[in-house]
Image (cartoon, rainbow, N blue to C red):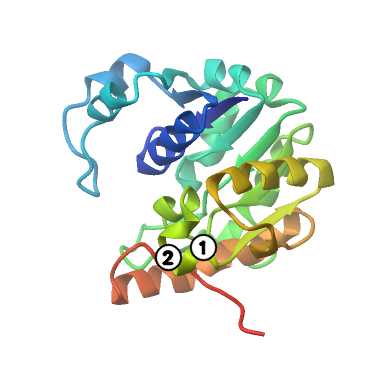
C-alpha cells in the first residue's frame, strides 16, 4: 500500500520506518526538503537530525507536503497538534480528497511550559480531529494512536504482551475498518481496539494526554499504556 506521512519528527520517523519494514511504499512529507536534509542539530528531545535517520531508511522517500499527500492511499498526520491544520492545508485539500487521513496528533499547548494543557479552542466541546474533519469534509478522518508513546504505536507487544488499549473515532465505518487492518499489521489485537464512535470521540482520546503527560513525568518513560479491568 502507498502510505504518506505528514511530519518528519520522531513520531513520523517511527511510523515511516515500521511501515516500510512491513513492506508498504512510504513517503514522508516536509515543508522544505532541502532545509530538512541540511539540518545538523539534534531535536528538542535529543534525537539526531533527520538526514541521519534517512540514511538508514533511504527506502522512505522524502518530498514536500503536497507531493506526499498526493502519493498516498492513506495519509497519516504526524505533525504537532498546534501546527497540524497549517501543514494539512499546505498538503492540499485536493490531494486529501476521498482519502483516509489517520490523525495521531494532539492539540497540546506548551506556551506556559510543562506540563502542557490542551489548546482551549480544541478541547472539551471540540477537538483537533473534529477541526480537521470540518476543514477537509471530503477526507475520511480517523483518530487513533494518539494516546501513547510512538514506540508503542508500532509495537504494542513491547509491554503487557500487547494487551492494552487503543481507540478509534471517525465518521466513516469503512475507513475505520481499513485503519483497523493496518493497526493489526503493527500487532494490535482487534479486541483491544475500542471504537469510540464518530469523530466527536476525538474529544475524549485527546483528553487522555492530560493524564498521560503527567504520568510520563512521574514514571518517567514512554512505554506505558492504559487498559480496562472488567
Helix, strand or loop at mark 1: helix
Crowding at dot 1, Cα within 10 Å, few <14 / some 14-19 / many 20+, comes out as some
Badge number at residue 159: 2
Q: Nearer the viewer, residue 216 or 31?
A: 216
Badge number at residue 162: 1
Helix, strand or loop at mark 2: loop
Looking at the image, residue 16 lies above or below residue 106? above
Residue 57 lies, in percent from the top left, at 34, 25
Q: Can I make out residue 22 in this image?
A: yes
Task: Single out the residue that lies furthest toward the left.
Answer: 41
State the count of labels: 2
Q: Quadrant of residue 140?
A: top right
Report the residue at 28% width, 30% height from top.
53
Q: Quadrant of the N terminus?
A: top right
Report the residue at 23% width, 32% height from top.
49
Residue 130 lies, in percent from the top left, at 70, 50
Report the residue at 53% width, 55% height from top.
146
Q: Quadrant of residue 198?
A: bottom right
Residue 31 lies, in percent from the top left, at 42, 23
- The Cα atoms of the two marked residues, 1 and 2, are separated by 6 Å
Badge number at residue 93: none
Residue 189 lies, in percent from the top left, at 63, 58
Q: Quadrant of residue 48?
A: top left
Answer whether labels 1 and 2 touch (C-beta < 8 Å).
yes
Q: Nearer the viewer, residue 169 or 131?
A: 169
Amino acid at each position: 500500500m502507498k502510505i504518506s506521512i505528514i511530519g518528519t519528527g520522531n513520531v513520523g520517523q517511527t511510523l515511516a520506518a515500521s511501515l516500510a519494514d512491513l513492506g508498504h511504499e512510504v513517503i514522508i512529507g516536509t515543508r522544505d526538503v532541502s532545509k530538512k536534509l541540511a539540518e545538523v542539530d539534534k531535536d528538542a528531545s535529543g534525537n539526531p537530525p533527520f538526514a541521519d535517520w534517512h540514511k538508514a531508511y533511504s527506502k522512505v522517500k522524502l518530498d514536500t507536503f503536497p507531493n506526499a499527500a498526493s502519493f498516498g492511499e492513506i495519509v497519516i498526520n504526524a505533525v504537532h497538534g498546534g501546527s497540524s491544520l497549517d501543514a494539512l492545508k499546505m498538503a492540499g485539500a485536493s490531494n486529501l480528497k476521498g482519502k483516509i487521513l489517520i490523525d495521531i496528533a494532539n492539540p497540546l499547548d506548551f506556551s506556559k511550559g510543562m506540563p502542557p494543557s490542551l489548546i482551549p479552542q480544541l478541547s472539551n466541546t471540540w477537538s483537533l480531529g473534529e477541526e480537521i474533519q470540518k476543514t477537509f469534509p471530503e477526507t475520511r478522518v480517523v483518530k487513533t494512536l494518539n494516546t501513547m508513546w510512538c514506540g508503542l504505536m508500532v509495537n504494542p507487544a513491547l509491554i503487557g504482551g500487547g494487551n492494552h488499549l487503543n481507540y478509534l473515532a471517525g465518521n466513516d465505518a469503512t475507513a475505520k475498518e481499513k485503519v483497523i487492518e493496518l493497526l493489526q499489521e503493527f500487532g494490535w489485537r482487534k479486541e483491544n481496539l475500542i471504537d469510540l464512535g464518530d469523530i466527536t470521540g476525538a474529544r475524549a482520546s485527546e483528553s487522555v494526554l492530560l493524564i498521560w503527560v503527567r504520568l510520563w513525568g512521574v514514571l518517567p518513560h514512554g512505554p506505558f499504556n492504559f487498559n480496562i479491568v472488567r
